Amino acid sequence: MDVPGFALVTGAGSGIGLACAMVYAREGSAGVCLADISPEALQKASEQVQSVATNPEFKAISVVVDVRSEESVNKMVSETIKAFGRLDYAANCAGVSFKPGHGHEGGWSMTNYDFVTDINFRGVFLSTKAEIAAMKTQEPRDNPRRPDKKQRGSIVNIASMSGLVGLKNSAAYAASKHAVVGLSKNAAIDHAEDLIRCNAVCPGYIYTALTQNDTIRAKAEKLSADKPMGRLGEPEEIGDAVVFLSGGRASFVTGTAFSVDGGYTAV
């Protein structure tokens, strides 16, 4: 158990965000703040997360957040600190592929661009900014793995393999995820001396709500079939990577874009 502290997860109502929250709980975290724009999704997610928690003192709270709003994001972080007293790990998972009704063919429309970048990049920027501000005010926590390597906090931002390479008909999405990678690298540089680490995780095609559409799912499976591992990933596989980067085993890892894509970008 090397994530004994308190975590905040955005986009925690489903998919990768929910998987991250469940892995934190399963790996012994003392508490998780689940943040999402959907109250209904949060209620179900909270029950799932609490059911797998292994820390006897585990506490889960839920906060409705619109990551596009600085006021809403600041309130989310404040509620986390109010409930737990500190924030040790943050996983910023809230994201979209495209504006509903536009599809990937709308990748170059400004309506789609504004919607996608507001959530995928502005949302991560605001969340990272608020989380760092909170982490800087707290005392460093001991590293269970390496007692001499303390940290104030660790932030993991969900980017995408499209943050490393292009993806056909996904201009706005790819641009937003490249921006997340750049932000994560800069945050790592700017706050290493504060004992705060920041990394990006770049998932490949994953079985989530975003791939439930039959057309998108079929396309994803076809594109993955001729890549090294030949399959789509599971949300829990991303959660495992996020929690690894959060904890003591990754004490010397910061500013990286960590690919979890079955070898997709290696080809």
Image (tube, rainbow, N blue to C red):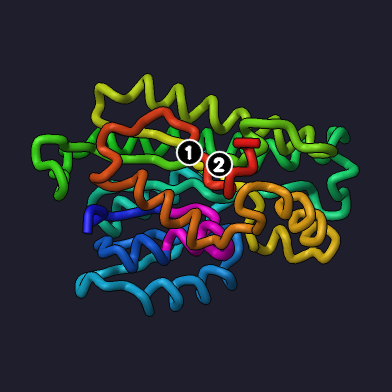
Instruction: State the extent of the magenta-drawn residues as a range.
Output: 9-21
Given residues 104 and 249, the one toward you in this image is: 249
**Rendering quarter of residue 32:** bottom left
Q: Position of residue 203 (x, y in %)?
A: 58, 47
Q: Is residue 127 magenta?
A: no
From this view, report whether residue 233 is shown above or below residue 193: below
* Quadrant that contains the C terminus: top right
In the image, taking residue 138 as reference, residue 77 lies left or right, namely right
> Which label's residue is closer to the chain start, 2 or 1?
2
Q: Which residue is mark 2?
A: 202
Crowding near the residue tagged with mark 2, few <14, some 14–19, many ≥20 C-alpha atoms within 10 Å = many
Instruction: Label 1: state its secondary structure.
Output: strand
In the image, taking residue 129 as reference, residue 70 lies left or right, namely right
Q: Residue at the spot x=36%, y=75% of the render?
A: 52
Crowding near the residue tagged with mark 1, few <14, some 14–19, many ≥20 C-alpha atoms within 10 Å = many
Under mark 1, the amino acid is Phe
Given residues 74 and 160, the one toward you in this image is: 160
Residue 5 is at least partly visible in this image: no
* Quadrant that contains the N terminus: bottom left
Q: Is residue 19 magenta?
A: yes
Q: Which residue is mark 1?
A: 258
Residue 145 is at least partly visible in this image: yes
Q: Position of residue 239 (x, y in %)?
A: 45, 56
Under mark 2, the amino acid is Cys
CB under 8 Å between discs 2 and 1? yes
